[in-house]
Amino acid sequence: MALDQIKIPAVFMRGGTSNAVVFKQSDLPADRALWDEIFLAAIGSPDPNGRQLDGMGGGISSLSKVCVIGPPSREDADIDYTFAQVAVKDAVVDYSSNCGNMSSAMGPFAVDEGLVQVSGDSAYVRIHNTNTGKIIHSRFPLDGGRAAVDGDMVLQGVAGTGAPVRLEFEDPGGASTDRLLPTGRPVDRIEADGFGAIDVSLVDATNACLFVRAGDIGLTGTEMSDEIDADSALMDRLEELRCRVSVTMGIASSLDDAAAKPSIPKIGIVTGPQQAPTLSGANLAADGMDLLARMISLGNCHRALPLTGALCLTVAARIPGTVVHDVTRPPEDYSEDLHIAQPSGLTISCATVTRSGEAWFADRACVYRTARRIFEGNILVPSSRVTEVIAAEHSAAAE
């Protein structure tokens, strides 16, 4: 008798300000074309109600993610990490970008699963993100041979404290387009429905992003995420702009193709330092920040900055002429940390950017996160949703 549900070993983890279901590659079908239906069923998509109650998702993009860890395909890495962004309302699984927040959980996962051998009081794991082809260095403390959880680091947007995970993104430029500035310019003027001609900066570091000044789209920059999400006319105009920019950046070949790749470019809305509210009810003082930002992906304004978006912001802030640089408080030293105000508080990051002739290069970008293994066991997936997967697996077993 066929089982109503199939079991797949998995771990549910928090990485930074995101959650994801994490699989070992060896527990999934060898044919990656079969992964999408498993991921959709596990997360609970598509859900026209936007709640994902029939899966592990949380109804917003930062809580609708899957990660897959496998053996390294490069000599300079200890593990391969593939990220899948699962749409909430649509049957879409997008592999075109990385999740920086969940990157912070990949080293701890690999250590706790015995995929990487460690000793002493700290671990160093080299992560190859297959989505972008980039290497991430992860450093974190150990507790009894496993990734430490307890610590005194406060991560804005996450309750309590945790053990710090330092992430160093090596050569992060061109993760999606092969160029830090895909058009070769720090600012471009784009014609977009509803906005007319508007200045944007197109930057590709850890993930491709488009940045726009809040005032140019009728915002102050201090609006909270729910307020932005509720403005359907604005969100529609921003999506149309995102699709046009996707074609301009060479990510998509057409507007339809851009709509089918919803996770990049991410949209960054920026403005200069000013007093701003947070989700906790506290107010951030203008003199405690270097710039103020909101970020949108998959039609959702993030409650905390996506890590790759924050790092791309940091790189853009160090390139003269970008709209981000123009609104950022001028630093005394460009090697200083950048304090970015966002709905959950402050994100602190750093980047090393150099210029050679007319071209800009991002040498390194780094940030601290925390991570925690929350649940381990099996994901139960209704067999009715993955009949093709089951048939393929049975066929392989019979051979």
Image (cartoon, rainbow, N blue to C red):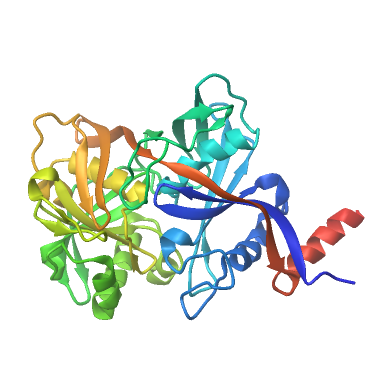
Identify the residue at image location x=38%, y=70%.
Answer: 255
Asked if residue 231 is positioned above or below residue 185 in the image, the reply reads below
State the image quarter where residue 237 is shown. bottom left
Q: Nearer the viewer, residue 78 or 250?
A: 78
Identify the residue at image location x=53%, y=27%.
Answer: 76
Q: Nearer the viewer, residue 362 or 119?
A: 119
Identify the residue at image location x=52%, y=36%.
Answer: 107
Residue 280 in the image: state x and y as whole percent: 26, 59
Residue 106 in the image: state x and y as whole percent: 52, 41
Which image quarter is the N terminus in? bottom right
Asked if residue 207 lies left or right of residue 15, the reply is left
Asked if residue 46 is positioned above or below residue 331 in the image, the reply reads below
Asked if residue 10 lies left or right of residue 332, the reply is right
Residue 330 in the image: state x and y as whole percent: 8, 39
Does any portion of residue 322 appear in the rendered image? no
State the image quarter where residue 120 is shown. top right
Q: Nearer the viewer, residue 321 or 111?
A: 111
Residue 88 in the image: state x and y as whole percent: 48, 70
Identify the residue at image location x=48%, y=38%.
Answer: 149
Q: Which of 296 and 375 is in front in this view?
A: 375
| Number of dots carrying numbers | 0
Asked if residue 323 lies left or right of residue 231, the reply is left
Does any portion of residue 163 appear in the rendered image? yes
Asked if residue 151 lies left or right of residue 240, the reply is right
Farthest top residue? 120
